[in-house]
Structures are given as C-alpha cells and as structure tokens.
Image (cartoon, grey):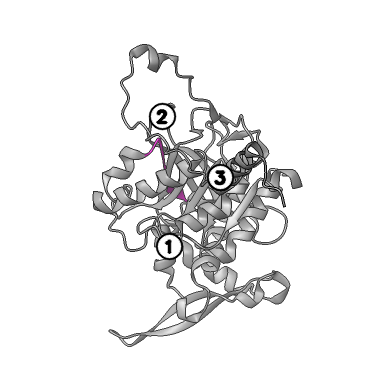
C-alpha cells in the first residue's frame, strides 16, 4: 500500500487537531460597579413612565399598610384588576396607562382569595384576556433567608411579570426581626435580586400597622419604598387610603372606600367614594350589619374561635352595643332560607363564673 502524499498527511493531522481542540470561552468582563456621571448624563435619562399615573411604575417598591380590617388587600386587588385590563382610574383619580402582567403571592386568607378576585373581575368586567394577565402563587418564599427565592424566579420568569404582590410582608419574612436594619436589609437585597433576575418588575408588599398605627418595623422599609400607602378604618364597613411617603408622585389626602357584593354571595369588590361625599349609596345600618357578618366569616369560623361583641366591635372599629344589636338581629334570622350562619355559644367567664355570649359563623351555610 502506498504511503499518503505529504500534503494529504499534513491536512489530515491539521483536521484531527482541530477536532481534538477544546473550545475555551473567553473570561467575561467584570461588571462595572462604579461609574462617574455628569449632570448631563442624569438629565439625558428618560422621565419615568407611570403605569398608574403618579403612583406606580416598573421597578418601584410599594408598601401598602394598615390595621386589620382596613380592606387594604381588597384595595390592592382593585389596583391589580385595573392593571390587568390596562385602563380605568384607580381610586377614582389615578389613570391606568399600561396593561401589566401581575403575580400575586399569598398564603394569607387563602379560603377567601377566590371570592375577592372573582368580585374584582365582575366589578371591572374583566375579559378572559384580562384575567390571563394574572398568576397566583399560594406558596410563599422566605425573603429573609432566601429559601424558595430561586424557585420563585424560575417559576414566574417565563410569565414575565410587571408586578409582583407579596401578601403579607410578615408571611414572606419568617424569622426576620422587622425592627432591625440587618434583617430587613437582607430582605431588601433579596427583593432587588428578584427584580434584577426578572427584568425589573415592580414589587408591592401588603403590610401591617403597629399598635400606634404607624408602619410596623424599621424605618429602613420607609426609606427604600418609592410609594407608601396607608390604610385606616373610618367606620362600619368603610376605610380610607392616603400616601405616607412618595418619591416620584404627589402626596394625596385620604380617599374613602367601601366594599360591595358583586354577583354570588361573598364575592366583594372595592367601591371608591367621591371626594365630595363620604357616604355610600347604602345606609350606615346596612354597612354595619355587613361588617359584622364579614368579621365573623373571616375571623370567627367555629366555636373555638368565637368572639364576644366587644371583641368584634374592636375589630371593626365601632361600639359593642351597636355590634350586639346586629348580632341579635342576624341570629334571630338565621334560617336556611337566608343562608345566615350566625351562631351564639355561651362560655363561662372564669373570673366571675358567669356565662358570656360568644359569636361565630357556621360555615355549613356558605355557598361554595
């Protein structure tokens, strides 16, 4: 057999060498952390574009806080619904300019979430296309120690959310000390990581107030937030929202609202009250009656969780005598025809050994 020609042999060796070569990716250039900028650089940046005029834009951190039963979650679901549709006026005065994809992360009030979302959908007449702009995550990550953060990012990144709502801040920061900058600094770092990994969505936390009515936790939260919305109870079945700090928008005074039933039983949505009127179309007695029923449905779900009329009154911001009047009215009318599940049980008061009436909601009367 003849030997290969020298030129052919050289070509074969070169080809084999190419196939055997290991491809090595060049080292990525390190990200520049610091940069000197001029005033002209800053002025050349585009003005922020608000999805909700003067209130919310991409990349923002928003805090919505208030006491229990101030309907803050209802109000934020109202905001979510308008963003999903991409039109309308939030709180009757803030124009919604963009259609956003929303991710709602919550394991608080899971049993009632379907009713609140259904109520908002019906109230705003959302189409199936609008509703498709919402995803719900009912297992929460821990933004303090990072547990579940990467899984959440991986789960929602193909959806490309514009807004992520965490309900509540306490639920997603288990183990953190809200009063220390070290703990909440770690939480904010994880929030920034989520925003960077997902292309800069806005993040909204629903949070609780402390005993004095201020935002619970360290002032680091207030300093980091772009917009802070404070909610307060204004009376039977009525609450208010106002700004408690805003960086790029304008401060506004309290706007009162109530909730109304939409469609099937227990599906409720927010109805904003006009600036020139503090009254709903319904009278106060009707509002109070519904507030008492709602409190029992949400909080007193069985005999073990039954509450006295003063306890219920404290929860909804009115007098015990007023609550007792409506409880007795409801209890007298709790027939199957009315779907009224208000029940009473007498418990002994240990100190005085006297029976005290406690009230609760019988869930067998619920329409699912």
Examine the structure image and report whether residue 227 is included in the region drawn in magenta. yes
Residue 112, position as x, y percentages in the image: 58, 63
Cα gap from disc 1 to disc 2, whole angstroms: 32 Å
Q: Residue at x 27, y 44 (%)?
A: 219
Mark 3: give few (<14), some (14-19) or many (20+) Cα within 10 Å: few
Cα gap from disc 3 to disc 2, whole angstroms: 70 Å
Q: Earlier in the sequence, mark 3 or mark 2?
A: 3
Q: Residue at x 42, y 84 (%)?
A: 347
Q: Is residue 259 above or below residue 300?
A: above
Predominant secondary structure, magenta span: strand
What's the magenta region?
225-235
Mark 1 — residue?
313
Mark 2 — residue?
251
Cα gap from disc 3 to disc 1, whole angstroms: 84 Å
Give residue 107's mark: none
Report the quarter where the C terminus lies.
Answer: bottom right
Q: Is residue 199 above or below residue 251?
A: below
Q: Earlier in the sequence, mark 3 or mark 1?
A: 3
> Is residue 283 shown to the viewer in this render?
no
Left or right: 316, with 7 as reference point: left
Q: Quadrant of residue 35?
A: top left
| Front one among 63 and 66 | 63
Mark 3 secondary-structure assignment: helix
Examine the structure image and report whether residue 92 is included in the region drawn in magenta. no
Mark 3 — residue?
17
């Amino acid at each position: 057999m003849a030997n290969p020609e020298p030129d052919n042999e050289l070509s074969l060796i070169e080809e084999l060498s190419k196939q055997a070569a290991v491809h090595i990716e060049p080292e990525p250039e390190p990200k520049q952390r610091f940069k000197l900028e001029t005033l002209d650089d800053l002025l050349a940046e585009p003005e922020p574009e608000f999805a909700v005029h003067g209130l919310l834009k991409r990349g923002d951190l928003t805090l919505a806080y208030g006491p229990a039963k101030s309907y803050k979650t209802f109000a934020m679901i109202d905001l979510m619904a308008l963003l999903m549709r991409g039109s309308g006026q939030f709180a009757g005065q803030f124009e919604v300019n963009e259609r956003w994809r929303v991710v709602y992360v919550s394991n608080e009030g899971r049993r009632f979430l379907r009713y609140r979302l259904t109520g908002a959908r019906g109230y705003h007449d959302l189409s199936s296309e609008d509703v498709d702009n919402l995803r719900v995550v009912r297992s929460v990550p821990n933004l303090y120690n990072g547990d579940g953060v990467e899984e959440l990012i991986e789960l929602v990144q193909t959806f490309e959310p514009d807004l992520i709502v965490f309900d509540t801040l306490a639920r997603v920061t288990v183990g953190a000390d809200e009063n220390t900058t070290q703990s909440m600094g770690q939480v904010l770092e994880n929030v920034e990581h989520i925003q960077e990994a997902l292309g800069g969505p806005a993040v909204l936390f629903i949070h609780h107030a402390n005993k004095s009515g201020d935002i619970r936790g360290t002032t680091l939260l207030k300093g980091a937030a772009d917009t802070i919305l404070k909610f307060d109870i204004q009376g039977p079945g009525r609450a208010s929202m106002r700004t408690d700090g805003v960086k790029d928008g304008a401060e506004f005074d309290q706007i009162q609202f109530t909730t109304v039933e939409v469609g099937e039983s227990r599906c409720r949505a927010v109805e904003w009250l006009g600036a020139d009127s503090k009254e709903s179309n319904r009278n106060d007695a009707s509002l109070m009656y519904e507030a008492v029923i709602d409190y029992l449905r949400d909080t007193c779900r069985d005999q073990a969780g039954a509450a006295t009329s003063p306890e219920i009154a404290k929860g909804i911001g009115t007098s015990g005598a007023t609550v007792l009047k409506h409880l007795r009215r409801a209890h007298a009318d709790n027939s199957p025809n009315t779907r009224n599940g208000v029940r009473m049980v007498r418990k002994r008061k240990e100190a005085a050994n006297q029976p005290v009436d406690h009230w609760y909601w019988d869930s067998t009367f619920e329409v699912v």
